[in-house]
Image (cartoon, rainbow, N blue to C red):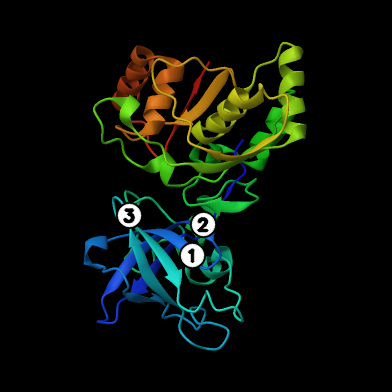
Amino acid sequence: MNNTRVVPAKFRLRRASGGAIDALFLNEPQPGMWEALLKGAQRVCEGETLTIDNASDDSSQSAGGEPLTMIAQKRGERGRWQLKFAGASLPNEKPQSAFDILTKVGRMPLPPYIKRTKGTDGRDSDDQQRYQTIYADPPGAVAAPTAGLHFTPAIFDKLRDANISRTFVTLHVGYGTFAPLEVDNLANHQMHEEYFQIHRDTCNHLSQTRDEGGRVVAVGTTSARVLESAWQANRHNEPAQGMTGIFCYPPYKFGGFDALMTNFHLPKSTLMAMVMAFGGVDLIRRAYRHAIERKYRFFSYGDAMLIV
């Protein structure tokens, strides 16, 4: 299971003109520097000063009481921007971490197909609880590992009673997971890297399970990416961590896990490509036809399937 914790990665920036820019935090390559996805990014100019907006309280202010401002430094592809905190490079001022700031001013990054009342999206206490696995631990994801949302303490009890053990890996879900496919040939898609980690205890657990004739079930495509990345690195013989840009699409031979539990994903996504690579194109197409006919729920809060 992927134990990453979703951070409240959605926030709002205010231009000098008063106009608002909705933003999604992607990562913090260095202290005081953020990479973010901006809605209406074409309106922003390099060098422009943007203020973090949070009208509800003073949490969008610096320690000195000044509003937190960012400089739009570098434009990237598909709405991505590099933003730098104004004054963050001063030697006598240590910038706050992204997670500290987002905890105060951010909202849960619900996917756009989950509709909420404007201005309250991602702030509702139910969403803050439900768009997070019950075993979430290290913060860093900007989208939930949705297959894990199905698990409850009661289900954990049933797994234990059935002698099914569980262990955890980490992949901080980022832009690489949900970036759409925009190529005709999957080999031409460039996967954006995401941070992953697998501990020695987990490696030992996986090896012991297989040595005893058991199977490793990946809960979600993000867990699958960790297991496959670590398998390619050292066959799960050693712990591993770092950045992974692994992209599994048909035909691909998996070695890091034996079964996959996953939600029904969006079309034209890297997630769908991985699921088809593991389950087979024809089988997955039949599964989706069945799901549509039976009116299954799709996407983040939707139903799941187990590919054995």
Circle 3: residue type:
Gly
245 relative position to 213: left or right? left
Mark 2 or mark 3, which is nearer the start of the sequence? 2
Res. 75 image quadrant? bottom left
> Is residue 264 among what the camera can see?
no
- Report the Cα–Cα distance between label 3 and label 2: 14 Å
Numbered disc 2: secondary structure: strand
Q: Residue at x 40, y 22 (%)?
A: 249
Residue count near mark 1 (Cα–Cα under 10 Å), binned few <14, some 14–19, many ≥20: many
Q: Nearer the viewer, residue 103 or 180?
A: 180
Q: Is residue 108 left or right of residue 184?
A: right
Residue 175 location (% of width, % of height): 42, 46
Report if the CB atoms under discs 2 and 1 are less than 8 Å apart.
yes
Element class at badge 1: strand
Distance in Å between CA atoms under marks 1 and 3: 14 Å
Q: Is residue 243 above or below residue 67?
A: above
Q: Secondary structure at mark 3?
A: loop
Q: Position of residue 105 (x, y in %)?
A: 48, 71
Q: For mark 3, what is the residue?
A: 76
Residue 122, position as x, y percentages in the image = 43, 61
The residue drawn where x is 51% and y is 62% is 125
Q: Residues within 10 Å of mark 3 (few under 14, many from 20)?
A: few
Amino acid identity at mark 1: Met
Task: Report the disc number at residue 287.
Answer: none
The residue positioned 70% from the left and 31% from the top of the image is 166
Labelled pair 3, 2 in contact (Cβ < 8 Å): no
| Residue 9 can be seen in this image | yes
CB atoms of marks 1 and 3 within 8 Å: no
Label 1 belongs to which residue?
Answer: 33
Using the image as rendered, state which of residue 282 and residue 101 is in the foreground.
101
- Using the numbered discs, state the Cα–Cα distance from disc 2 to disc 1 in whole angstroms: 6 Å
Q: Which residue is mark 2?
A: 29
